[in-house]
Image (tube, helix red, strand yellow):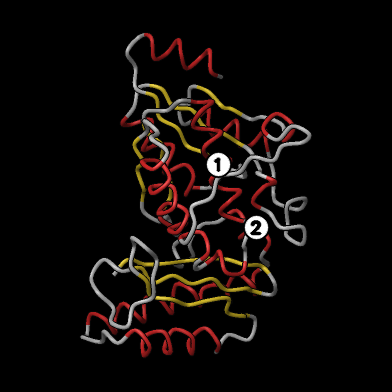
Amino acid sequence: MRDRVRGVKSGGKCVGFVPTMGFLHEGHLSLVRASVRSTDYTVVSIFVNPAQFAPHEDFKDYPRDRERDLELLRSEGVHAVFAPLPDALYPEGHRTYVEVHGLQDRLCGKTRPAFFRGVCTVVLKLFHIVGPDVAFFGQKDAQQSIIIRRMVPELDLDVRIEVCPIVRDDDGLALSSRNAYFDGAQRKAALCLHRSLEMARVKITGGERDAARLIHAIRGDIQAEPRAKIDYVEIVDTKELLPRDTAREGDLIALAVYIDGVRIIDNIII
């Protein structure tokens, strides 16, 4: 991978990079297309990162379909796919990790304390291996994008981070590989995330800015769905991810909800 990218860069070409865990959907492909449009050479990684899963989480069951992924990436004009085995990135005895203190402990980090340590570690490794000029991430993983944007300048990495909009199905559900776990009834129940966020957007447009009242309304809407169990609902700034008393333009409304035990996330920017 390194040799290939060195050869590409020696010709003065711009390298774009899309890190993924595979089982690709239109959300991933929107990032791929952004890279293909705006760079000369696009690399996509496929790696289900064990370091970001807790022992009780779904690492072994996480959906995988390597051949389908490769066919999709060929059809999008991707130049190279980097798909290492876990031992290649985490050899026996590996004990070096990257953390962004404070940011990694909020929102999703409260109930997934090792998650962002694993994310930052693997992203840093991939950046060093691939050496991209531009890397593309999705707004659906808002906290991840904010943390990576903090990590990059603080570790003096020479890569520009582009964050692309959330891609949704026609019914509003944000695309996620974990949506594959849902049957029809569960998928219908999962629509409560988007519905509650849109309800909050309407309230804000109508002048409501009290964060506690907005959160109460969102929680009430989600709790009306019997299959849903709330992990968190928060309104935070997009620099430090600190809770707001008053919702402001540019703030993040983020939530995580379990649908029959499957955890999914969604968000909007005010």
Across and down, in percent, residue 9 comes to: 39, 14
Residue at 28% in and 78% down:
247
Q: Which class describes the residues within 10 Å of circle 1: few (<14), some (14-19), or many (20+)?
A: some
Quadrant in the rendering for residue 143? bottom left
212 up-or-down from 31: above or below: below
Residue shown at 53%/40% (left/top)?
123
Left or right: 70 with respect to 17?
Answer: right
- Residue 249 point in image, percent of width and height: 23, 70
Instruction: Provide residue 158's location: percent of width, then percent of height.
Output: 36, 30
Dot 2 or dot 1, earlier in sequence: 1
Residue topped by disc 1: 20
Foreground residue among 161 and 139: 161
Of the numbered discs in the image, which one, if any, rests on residue 180? 2
Q: Secondary structure at mark 2?
A: helix
Disc 2 from disc 1: Cα separation: 16 Å
Question: What residue is at 74 percent from the left and 32 percent from the top?
Answer: 91
Mark 2 residue type: Ala
Horizontal side, residue 116 vs residue 207: left or right = right
Q: For the residue carrying disc 2, how many other residues have a C-alpha within 10 Å: few (<14), some (14-19), or many (20+)?
A: few
